[in-house]
Amino acid sequence: MYDWFVTQFMPPKRRTNYTFGFTHRRSGHQMATTTRRGIHMNPVKNRFRYLVVFLGLACLTSILSNYIIINFTFICMKDDPTGIELSENGTTYNRYDYSVAEKSAIVWAVAVGTILGTGPINYSYVRFGARIPFFIAGMVSAFATILTPIGAYLGLPYLLALRFAQGLAYSADFAAIGIVCVRWAPLTQTGLFISILTSFSPAATVMTNAASGWLCKSSYGWQSAFYVHGVIGFLIFAAWLYFYNDDPQFNKKVSAKELITIQKNKTQAHIERDSFVPYWEICKNRVILTVWINSFFEMTTLILLLTYSPIYFRKVLDFSVIETGMLISLSAVAHMPAKLISGWLSDRQFLSERVRMWFFNTSSVGLAGFMCVTLAYIPVTWKYTSVVMFSIVYTLMGTNCGGFYKCGTFAARQYAHFVLAMIQFMKCIALFAAPATVAIFVSDESSHTQWGYVYILNGSLMFIANILFFPMATDQPQPFTFVTRKTVEEEKKKRQIA
């Protein structure tokens, strides 16, 4: 009866979402769909998008975890007796005890790989979707992670090569967020999807630092931290390859009811996958430029804290290795709940969309920047107060999904994957900028004053970026979203006729 009703009264273009046995638009083959009874009897099938988004989170977390492991293992690698060598002048040294300059080079190697990989990875996503390119990136990351202990033993050049490979893999992260949001997120759940997917940074920090701290002090040694993370990466990306595809309308695990939810109020250009992107029109848009500026300064500070907080906690605040791992994990643990709650709140209609963007961007960029500055003025003897302040900064940054992230996604619509991929590029530059500020101001890693200069600079720049966001914030699609392959071809024909 229900199928008869749909056949008689539903417009033909919408019947494919309801009727039994609709036709695959690309291959022409018949595909099984869900009847009305199937929609009610299988509630899990109507929520497949949540499996996709959490699987995406796991993959993003794996890639980031693989490259930040070494930030923690630095503090226990230098005590590894297997690294002790005899120099030419008869003195001993540890091959795993890296200088400040060498540590910066190890961080910058990831940045170089990420910068060089962002363009090709973004093109491959636009051309082929996220399924295969992201899977390849995950495999590269896992292999490079497992080989890192060998590379560290062979020498710095080998380690830098593996770090470069991890940077290439890491360049796939933010474009993947954009693709998943564009293809799988309903417009009414954009904030929630962004909040879940961008939670990979705190998730990686909490799990990796805690696990690495335990593994470093275990009988298996610091090398085991890399082996464990690498194996987990293989398993997670195998699941990605099995479950994910880029087109919900062609996925047999997506019910008709869920497909309607995903595609509601989206334009045809938003639903259909096309390799066309108006790059120049996007890059010169003032709203998008403001989004990128805010993302750059916020990420520079976040990378600074993620990369150097183990060193700061150990050498300035004088915590033990195990205490350092646990306290860093605890200081970052509130970041994820803050992201999820702010993502959910940003989708609620209690204020206008623009006011909500102002609120969340101010908390994640402006107020977080101010709190970062205060770190410089907390006496070194108040070490637990410093830990609490780190927690506050991490937590405030977690609300960014309702600020510049959501603004960029709404303003760019079907081209959001490129905007978020460029946020990844901003993160690449931030991977240089954060170590650069440390290299400029910090010559003694145990100096509270020198670290204070770094916090003051980065926090002040965040505060200024937030001020620039106020006049630019919008939830409306920008003019470039109406530029498609079809409109460009029509414009060319008009010029030829004229």
Image (cartoon, helix red, strand yellow):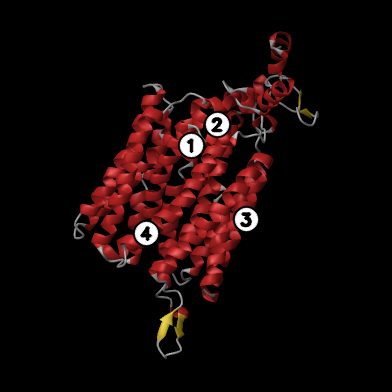
User: Which residue is label 2 attached to?
Assistant: 185
Q: Residue at x 68, y 41 (%)?
A: 127
Q: Which of the labelled discs sits on residue 308, or is there none? A: 4
For the residue labelled by badge 3, is the local secondary structure a helix, a strand or a loop? helix
Q: Is residue 157 left or right of residue 392?
A: right
Q: Amino acid at mark 3?
A: Met
Q: Earlier in the sequence, mark 1 or mark 4?
A: 1
The location of residue 465, given as percent across then percent down, is 36, 39
The residue lying toward the viewer, choosing from 258 and 411, is 411
Q: Earlier in the sequence, mark 2 or mark 3?
A: 3
For the residue labelled by badge 1, is the local secondary structure a helix, a strand or a loop? helix
For the residue labelled by badge 2, is the local secondary structure a helix, a strand or a loop? loop
Q: In this rendering, which labeled residue sits more in front, label 1 or label 4?
A: 4
342 to 430, vertically: above or below: above
Say few, some or many: other residues with alpha carbon within 10 Å of mark 1 (under 14 / 14 to 19 / 20 or more): many
Q: Do labels 3 and 1 touch, CB within 8 Å?
A: no
Q: Do labels 2 and 1 touch, CB within 8 Å?
A: yes
Q: In this rendering, which labeled residue sits more in front, label 3 or label 4?
A: 4
Q: Is residue 354 left or right of residue 3?
A: left
Say few, some or many: other residues with alpha carbon within 10 Å of mark 2 (under 14 / 14 to 19 / 20 or more): many
61 to 143, vertically: above or below: above
Q: Is residue 173 left or right of residue 126?
A: left
Q: Which of the labelled discs sits on residue 194, or is there none? A: 1
* Real-space Cα separation, disc 2 to disc 1, in angstroms: 9 Å
* Real-space Cα separation, disc 4 to disc 2, in angstroms: 34 Å
* Real-space Cα separation, disc 1 to disc 4, in angstroms: 26 Å
